[in-house]
Amino acid sequence: MENQNANQQPNLNGPNYLPSRAGVYDTIADDDRERGFGTPAHYTDATSRRAGVLQNIQVLMATQGQSATLATVAEMIQDLQASYGAQAPLEEVIQSLVGLHLQQAYLARRQRQQEAHR
C-alpha cells in the first residue's frame, strides 16, 4: 500500500497542497507565455491572487498615508469606473493613468523651469 501512495499525483486542489516554486514556475510559465505575459504569475489560485492584489493595494495606499480598507478600494474602483466605464480593459486604464501622470509631471517640471528663469 505504501508503494501505491508513492505513485499517486498530489491533489492540486487540496487545502494542504503547497506547490514548489519550480513546479509553479514551470506550469504557469507556459500558460503565461501563451497569453503573452513575459513573467509567470506568482499566485496559483483565485484566493491567492485576490490576496496578492489586496496586498499590493494596501502597500500603495500606505505610501500615500491612506487607510487601506475595502471601502477605500471600492471608492477608488467606482471612481475609475465612472471615468473609464465598467467594461474598460485594465491595460487601457493603466496606460491612460500613466499618460496622465507623465503629462502632469512634464507640466510641473516646465513650470519650475520657467519660474527659475524669471
Image (cartoon, rainbow, N blue to C red):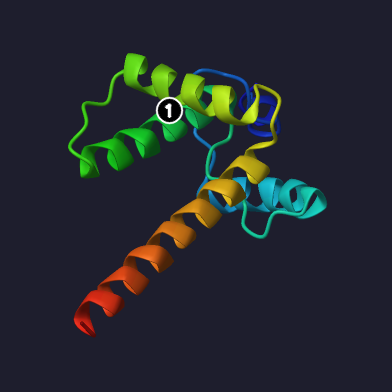
Extreme residue in the right direction: 34
Tell me the quarter of the picture where residue 70 sits: top left
Instruction: Count neighbours of disc 1 (C-alpha within 10 A) and say few if under 14, some if 14 to 19, many if 20 or more.
Output: few
The quarter of the picture where the C terminus appears is: bottom left
Question: Would residue 16 be seen by someone viewing this image from the given angle?
Answer: no
Tell me the quarter of the picture where residue 69 sits: top left
Question: Would residue 54 be seen by someone viewing this image from the given angle?
Answer: yes
Tell me the quarter of the picture where residue 51 sits: top left
Residue type at numbered disc 1: Ala
**Percent of width and height locating residue 108:** 33, 64
Instruction: Decide: is 14 above or below 53.
Output: above
Q: Nearer the viewer, residue 98 or 38?
A: 98
Disc 1 marks which residue? 51
The residue depicted at 59 percent of the width and 28 percent of the height is 45
The residue depicted at 70 percent of the width and 33 percent of the height is 7
**Percent of width and height locating residue 64:** 23, 41
The residue depicted at 61 percent of the width and 26 percent of the height is 2
Give the left or right position of residue 41, taking residue 111 as reference.
right
Give the left or right position of residue 19, taking residue 55 as reference.
right
